[in-house]
Image: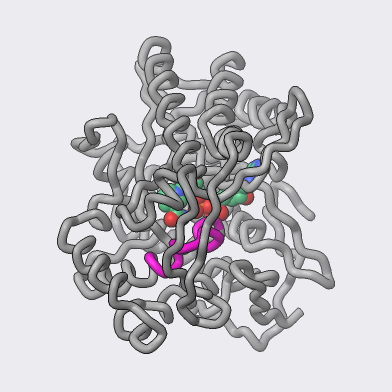
Amino acid sequence: MIVKPKTRGFICITSHPDGCAAHVQEQIDYVKSKGPVEGGPKNVLVIGSSTGYGLASRIVPAFSSGANTLGLFFEKPGTEKRTGTAGWYNSAAFEKAATEAGLYAKSLNGDAFSHDMKAKAVEMIKNEMGPIDLVVYSLASPRRINPDTGEDHRSVLKTTGGEYTNKNLNTDKGEIEEVTIGAATQEEIDNTIKVMGGEDWELWMTALDEAGVLAEGVKSVSYSYIGPELTWPIYTEGTIGMAKKDLEVVCERLNDKLVTKYNGSAYVSVNKALVTQASSAIPVVPLYISILYKEMKAQGLHEGCIEQIQRLFADRLYGADLQLDDSKRIRIDDLEMRADIQAAVAKSWDAISNENLADLADFDGYKEEFLKLFGFGLDGVDYDADTDPTFSPASIPS
Ligand code: NAD
């Protein structure tokens, strides 16, 4: 099959198997170039491991401390007629590369919120891996079916105050327009917390603890975002921000438990705003990211998921100093939040219009990175050649 990108709004409905593999290889090469992370984890479970921050969280321990990994995700395999999702191909490529490097790398495809997936993961860990010393929880999901009640919770991206209007980048048209975001009802806030809050992370840790598959000194980490004031109404003070607050409350509880029982720890790491499938769906954020990229690239400070997670592992989680903030969070958004970067971004934000978009924002960089998420625009990939859409993770053939 010859595969070309087909974008629909903030999603690309095709993905390129060889391109995704090249994207994964690029990240592996980066991690290898940084050398080993001494004392890094050896037996890792990543929940949400197929794209974005979760994929990077699988690649870094595998290729910096030789970790065996079990990755869990919700992706679609390809068929002879239709391409699979990028996360499917990423996972196929990761498994192949990790196995060739002599590492255990298997995957589970299904709903992480279900009891069934937790039971399957526990079984694989018990039978094939041995106790886990790092659990990364990196889900970004629009919905969660409660496995006990069958209730279907849908997350929303709304404010928790009044209506909020700001600039927005229509990424299809490449034009700046205004967007007005409505206020959520209490029910919508509660549902968003159910989906993106800490409850399921805690359920996972409880299942692993009760099954006796956590190692002495086990660490667990989940990801959050804060960002500048201009995005607060839609993010930090919006419905998603309420879910992230819940994540922090759960983290404290988990940390107490892991410290007591395993001499372990749990953290929330606040990461940089980056182009991923999840973030491209949030209003206002793509314009902010485009301006941020311009500024951070100009200052030589730009990082993608892999650079962020490499720094998280090498310098913080397994490094000399976690550098926790007042709320005991790890802050690898430190470069994004630097006062000079934020002052420059705020100035551009006020001044930006359709006329000066190319000068004040890196929209080309945004588009490039967005397409790369689906395996397009990678060096060395022949996009006119036939590619196999049924490329699958060896541990779960399609
Ligand atoms: P992403 O969309 O790239 O990845 C989401 C992952 O979750 C994928 O592996 C997907 O398969 C998996 N997933 C979704 N629903 C699932 C389900 N029901 N069962 C099993 N797997 C499921 O997202 P991302 O941007 O990497 O986000 C990961 C985390 O990082 C989120 O908590 C997000 O809030 C946080 N974060 C993101 C940014 C950013 O700018 N992208 C910044 C800071 C923090």
Q: Say above or below: 172 vs 147.
A: below
The residue located at (37%, 89%) in the rendering is 355
Q: How is the image coloured?
A: one colour
**Farthest residue toward the top?**
260
Q: Which residues are magenta?
A: 278-288
Q: Say above or below: 180 vs 394.
A: below
Depth order, front residue of 329/284: 284
302 is within the stretch colored magenta: no
**Farthest residue toward the front?**
162
x, y percent for residue 242: 47, 37
Dominant secondary structure (helix, strand or loop) of the stretch shown in magenta: helix
Q: Is residue 317 left or right of residue 235?
A: left
Visible in this render: residue 99? no
Q: Is residue 95 left or right of residue 388?
A: left
Depth order, front residue of 9/191: 191
286 is within the stretch colored magenta: yes
x, y percent for residue 115: 71, 27
Counting every numbered tag in the picture gives 0
Q: Which of the image's four quarters has the C terminus?
A: bottom right
Depth order, front residue of 352/324: 352
x, y percent for residue 131: 52, 24
The residue located at (73%, 48%) in the rendering is 396
Q: Say above or below: 201 vs 71.
A: above
x, y percent for residue 230: 34, 57
Visible in this render: residue 127? yes
Q: Say above or below: 124 vs 180.
A: above
Looking at the rendering, which quadrant does residue 72 occupy? top right
The residue located at (28%, 43%) in the rendering is 331
Q: Which of the image's four quarters has the N terminus?
A: bottom right
Looking at the rendering, which quadrant does residue 328 occupy? top left
The residue located at (30%, 79%) in the rendering is 360
